[in-house]
Image (tube, grey):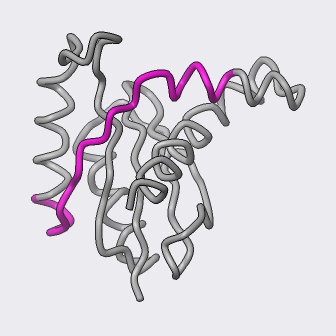
Amino acid sequence: MKKIMAIDYGDARTGIAISDLLCTIVGSTTVIHSRNPEKTADEIARLARENDVEALVMGFPKNMDGTEGPRAALYKEFAAQVEAVTGLPVTLWDERRTTVEAHNILSAHNYHGKKRKNTVDAVAAALILEGFLNRK
């Protein structure tokens, strides 16, 4: 069996969460620190190869009313770039409130300052993956 990878794309940090082999829970998380979309896509491709990933799910910014957010076009463009580099399909997944929820989780576990800044994107990616796996 192969794994599924979730991506919480950001300007400076991109959170990554990878499922377990049964695709039932989040198995691992990491953060890619890069402001360069090409480097970020290449790093996603490397992680996908190393972790035997078969599909990608990427958080997609929507407004609270369900319409596409102002960054939607940028995310679609990046998803196409990731598909081209990895050769894997990218499913866009509604990421409304994942970052807020990630901050709440980290606050509840006493993560503050730099520690939170370096973790929140991975937690958001884990929430995206969890939602996707639960829907599947």
Left or right: residue 65 compared with residue 67? right
* Residue 92 position within the rendered picture, expressed as x and y whole percent measured from the top left: 24, 43
Point 42% across, 66% down: residue: 47
Q: Nearer the viewer, residue 94 or 118?
A: 94
Q: Nearer the viewer, residue 112 or 64?
A: 64
Q: What residue range appears in magenta?
A: 84-103
* Residue 52 position within the rendered picture, expressed as x and y whole percent measured from the top left: 40, 80
Name the residue at the right extreme.
110
- The quadrant of the picture occupied by the C terminus is bottom left
Q: Nearer the viewer, residue 114 or 63?
A: 63
Left or right: residue 60 compared with residue 80? right
Point 63% across, 29% down: residue: 102
Name the residue at the bottom extreme.
1
Reply above or below: 68 against 26.
above
* Residue 87 position within the rendered picture, expressed as x and y whole percent measured from the top left: 14, 69
Report the label total: 0
Residue 100 sits inside the magenta stretch? yes
Residue 11 sits inside the magenta stretch? no
Left or right: residue 70 compared with residue 84? right
* Residue 131 position within the rendered picture, expressed as x and y whole percent measured from the top left: 47, 47
- The quadrant of the picture occupied by the N terminus is bottom left
Point 49% across, 22% down: residue: 97
Reply above or below: 80 against 43.
above
Point 16% across, 61% down: residue: 85
Q: Nearer the viewer, residue 43 or 73?
A: 73
